[in-house]
Amino acid sequence: MKLLPLALIGALLATPAVALEPIAKEKYINDRLIAARIADRIRRTCPTIDGRILYAFGEARRLKSYAQNKGYSNVQIDAFLHDKAEKKRIYGVAEDYLTRKGAKANDPQSFCAIGKQEIAAKSIIGSLLVAK
């Protein structure tokens, strides 16, 4: 019986059994980042809704832990968060959502209406917002 070299055994043990999908395709992570962007747009546009900033920071930490527990490295997470194309994609999805819900660029009250709906629905977006 032939023995495997120690280096090969180490490499096999270090290799994950299932390759991770690209972080940009991971639904849970992307859905929450999009929700955070939507909530941010609402709080910045609507004068009667504010963001739950401390809660949002806690959620961001939990999301990073989630990504790490899935097997993504800090380098992968940081690269994704700082990737301009990915940021543009997330912002675009958020803007599409707001437009579909009735947001109009020069109408802060249209953002307020969406924010109130999200808060009432107790959605992920709504959990990041609070009425003033």
Image: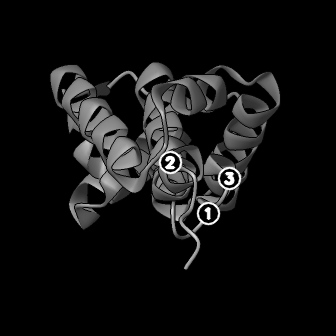
**The furthest residue to the front:** 1
Q: Secondary structure at mark 2?
A: helix
Q: Are marks 1 and 3 in contact (CB under 8 Å)?
A: no
Q: Disc 1 residue type?
A: Ala
Q: Is residue 85 left or right of residue 95?
A: right
Between residues 61 and 44, which one lies in front from this camera angle?
Answer: 61
Q: Quadrant location of the N terminus? A: bottom right
* Residue at numbered disc 2: 6
**Disc 2 and disc 1: Cα gap in Å?**
23 Å
Q: Say few, some or many: other residues with alpha carbon within 10 Å of mark 1 (under 14 / 14 to 19 / 20 or more).
A: few
Give the spatial CA distance, label 1 vs label 3.
Answer: 9 Å
Q: CA distance from mark 2 to mark 3?
A: 30 Å
Q: Residues within 10 Å of mark 2 (few under 14, many from 20)?
A: few
Image coordinates of residue 14 in percent, x first then y, are 48, 50
Residue displayed at 30% across by 50% down: 126
Amino acid on which the number 2 mark rests in the picture: Leu
Q: Secondary structure at mark 3?
A: loop
Whether residue 9 sits left or right of residue 60 in the image: it is right
Q: Residues within 10 Å of mark 3 (few under 14, many from 20)?
A: few
Residue linked to disc 3:
22
Residue 62 place in picture, x, y as percent: 24, 40
Tell me the mark number nearer the camera, choosing from 2 and 1. Answer: 2
Name the residue that disc number 1 marks. 19
Q: Nearer the viewer, residue 64 or 108?
A: 64
In primary-sequence order, the first of circles 2 and 1 is 2
The residue positioned farthest toward the right in the image shown: 85
Q: Which mark is residue 71?
A: none
As drawn, which residue projects farthest toward the bottom?
1
What's the residue type where badge 3 is placed?
Answer: Pro
Q: Residue at x 59, y 52 (%)?
A: 8
Q: Name the element at disc 1.
A: loop
